[in-house]
Each structure stands twice: as structure tokens, then as C-alpha cells.
Image (cartoon, grey):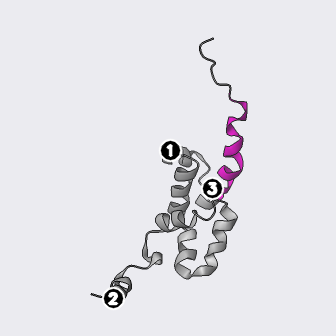
Amino acid sequence: KTSFQLVCQMPSLTEVPAPVLVSILTYVAYDSRKIESYKVLCKNIAGALESDTAWLHLSMAYWYLSPEQFNHWPSSLSGKAKYRALEKWVPLQGMYTLVTPYPW
């Protein structure tokens, strides 16, 4: 087979599962609003960005949130809304935490 035939047989980027596709898009930016701007690329990407599963995956990967912690948030919020809230508040989380001094 020629290299052209091999390239033509490769799956399209938009054929990967939504969490994987959104993870790939975050290599450009983790800001939720910038990620949302990728909707204009194609319908498959727009659909992936509407998936709560994709936003849960991003929350776990970037904000180190477990599925149990994700479920503690109000169920009325979408996965995207939860990600946006985490995006705002997680960076502030450690400000008031005092690490136990060692060896004092």
C-alpha cells in the first residue's frame, strides 16, 4: 500500500470518543471559553463539547477531581458548568491551607 492509501484509511479525529477529543483540544487551552470556541470547527466537535462525560473527564484530568467529588456538586449543573466553577475556585483552594511544618 502507498502512504496515501494508509492515510486515507486512518480514522478521522472526529471519530474518537468525546472525552478523548476534548482532551486533545485542551492541548491548545484549558480555559472553558476557549474550548467552547472549537464548536465552530464541525458538528462532531460541537457534540463532544455538549457531552457531560467529556467535561467530567476534563475535570478529573485537569482539576484532579474524582467522580465522587464531581457528584457532590449540584446535579442541576451541567458538566460544563461544574468545570467552569472548578476553573474559578480550585486555584484558590490551597491559599489558606497550612502545611504541617517538619521537623518542628
In magenta, the rendered stretch is 81-97
**Residue under label 3:** 83
Mark 2 or mark 3: whose residue is earlier in sequence: 2
- The answer for how far apart the CA atoms under marks 1 and 3 are is 15 Å
Identify which residue is drawn at 67% across, 60% down: 31
* As drawn, 16 above or below 3: above
| Number of numbered tags placed on the structure image | 3
**Residue under label 1:** 68
Residue 88 on the magenta span: yes
Mark 2 or mark 1: whose residue is earlier in sequence: 2
Q: Residues within 10 Å of mark 2 (few under 14, many from 20)?
A: few
Q: Residues within 10 Å of mark 3 (few under 14, many from 20)?
A: many
* As drawn, 69 above or below 31: above
- The answer for how far apart the CA atoms under marks 2 and 1 are is 45 Å
Q: Is residue 15 left or right of residue 62?
A: left
**Residue under label 2:** 5
Q: Which disc, if any, is residue 13?
A: none
Judged from this view, the residue extending furthest toward the top is: 104
Three-letter amino acid code at disc 1? Glu
Main SS class of the magenta portion in the image: helix
Where is residue 12 drawn, in percent x and y? 43, 79
Where is residue 97 drawn, in percent x and y? 68, 29
Where is residue 85 drawn, in percent x and y? 68, 52
Residue 10 on the magenta span: no
Q: Nearer the viewer, residue 90 or 11?
A: 11
